[in-house]
Amino acid sequence: MKTLVVYDSVYGNTEKIARAIGGAITGDVKVLHAGEANPAELEGIDLLIVGAPTQAGRPTPAMQAFLKKVTENAVNGMSVASFDTRIPAKWVGIFGYAAGKIGKNLKKKGGNLILPPEPFFVKGTEGPLKEGELERAASWATETIKSIK
Ligand SMILES: Cc1cc2nc3c(=O)[nH]c(=O)nc-3n(C[C@H](O)[C@H](O)[C@H](O)COP(=O)(O)O)c2cc1C
């Protein structure tokens, strides 16, 4: 099975989550920054996992730019999953979160969203990640794989 994990990260926390996800998946796995993920990379991919930090309730600009480049043809019928990093404060929720918006974008293009968008938590704007989040990311990746088999 071929998996592509595409992430953006400003302070490094989302990158750590993306790499934990990539490390937990067996088979052919590539983990790429949104800036280096050319849409041609999507060819032949069985599972696409996309994650970004939540900034102002949305994915970061680099992730938005990547999503803009992803055409309907590229993800139609493909298994997809999304995640984000965010602060565990209730007030920020009024703006929404990156993972839901990424998931919605991929679903609109025909992607088969196999699990609900998943949040991972940082303790502050620059991190660090809350304890246990890397382990939780690895288990989430395993769950993701199970739901497509
Ligand atoms: C400009 C800016 C806006 C942010 N807006 C939100 C937000 O709306 N909701 C939230 O939960 N976290 C918000 N955060 C916190 C980020 O989610 C946090 O910096 C990110 O998870 C860290 O991931 P990274 O290390 O991969 O960049 C914001 C951070 C910045 C710098």
Image: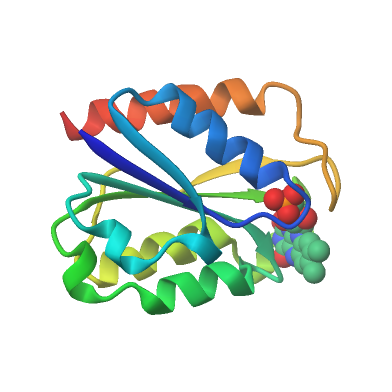
Colour pattern of the rendering: rainbow
Indicate the quadrant containing the N terminus: top left, top right, bottom left or bottom right: top left
Question: At 46% from the left edge and 71% from the top edge, which residue is drawn?
Answer: 66
Above-or-below relation of 78 to 15: below
Specify whether 17 is left or right of 12. left
Q: Residue 143: x percent and y percent?
A: 35, 26
Q: Residue 57: x percent and y percent?
A: 65, 68
Q: Quadrant of residue 149?
A: top left
Q: Residue 3: x percent and y percent?
A: 31, 40
Q: Residue 7: x percent and y percent?
A: 53, 53
Q: Ligand 1 falls in which quarter? A: bottom right
Question: At 24% from the left edge and 71% from the top edge, which residue is drawn?
Answer: 109
Above-or-below relation of 47 to 20: below
How many numbered dots are placed on residues in this image? 0
- Camera-side residue of 140 and 14: 14
Specify whether 136 is left or right of 82. right
Specify whether 54 is left or right of 7. right
Question: At 22% from the left edge and 49% from the top edge, which residue is drawn?
Answer: 45
Above-or-below relation of 67 to 17: below
Question: At 63% from the left edge and 68% from the top edge, which residue is drawn?
Answer: 60
- Camera-side residue of 34 and 103: 34
Res 116 visible: no
Above-or-below relation of 31 to 57: above
Res 55 visible: yes
